[in-house]
Image: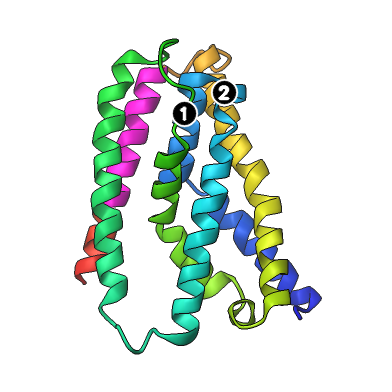
Amino acid sequence: MLSATDIALLAAGIAVVLTMPGPTNTLLAAAGLRHGLRRALPLIAGELSGYLVAISAWGRFFAHAAHAWPWLPSLLRGAASLYIAWLAVDMWRAAVVLPGSTQRAGNVRTLFVATLLNPKALLFGGTIFPAVAFTHAPAYLLSVSIFACLAAPIACAWIAFGAALGSGRLGWLEPVKVQRGASIVLGVFSLSLGWAALH
């Protein structure tokens, strides 16, 4: 089982990494901007599902098979880089129509895939989650429970930030410029992933 120190370090690491801007948080904020807080909240399920699948896969990978396929992390980083680049281009194009009342309330599948490919999951599975979480079921259940309890409110905060932009409560920020800026963040993130995959 995890000690109190392990739990504290796990919770702190999760909170810090999840709060940082990245592809998933950018998409959550963009959804809040486009659709408002209430209609974007279902996207949190896509984020949680994507992270839990990816973290579990990376954790098991590092616990049991990393030495067998040393090329796999680079391949996965390359795939994630291409997908995030596509998201960046799509977000840039969509910025001119924000906020649109005819758009769908959100796409859980897109958020799930973006989160599945998010390199933060690699960080969680490889370093932040304790190794014992991927070899003992009680430690795993405790770790993912802590993750879910922290991830949901942080995701909600990112959606609320986007919704505040869309409603004009942050009137000094223009939604189109924020959306375009978010697409640039995704693009830079994609380039950094591509660079990491090649080196």
* Distance between mark 1 and mark 2 Cα atoms: 7 Å
Q: Which residue is mark 2?
A: 39
Residue type, numbered disc 1: Gly
Image point (32%, 28%), residue name: 180
- Could you say where residue 81 lies in the image, as x and y percent from the top left? 27, 54
Would you place residue 160 above or below residue 124 in this image?
above
Would you place residue 127 above or below residue 37 in this image?
below
- Could you say where residue 183 lies in the image, as x and y percent from the top left? 32, 35
Label pair 1/2, CB-CB below 8 angstroms: yes
Q: Which residues are magenta?
A: 175-190
Is 181 covered by the magenta stretch?
A: yes
Q: Which mark is residue 4?
A: none
Image point (28%, 38%), residue name: 88
Would you place residue 111 above or below residue 107 in this image?
below
Q: Which mark is residue 106?
A: 1
Question: How many numbered discs sit on the rendered protein?
Answer: 2
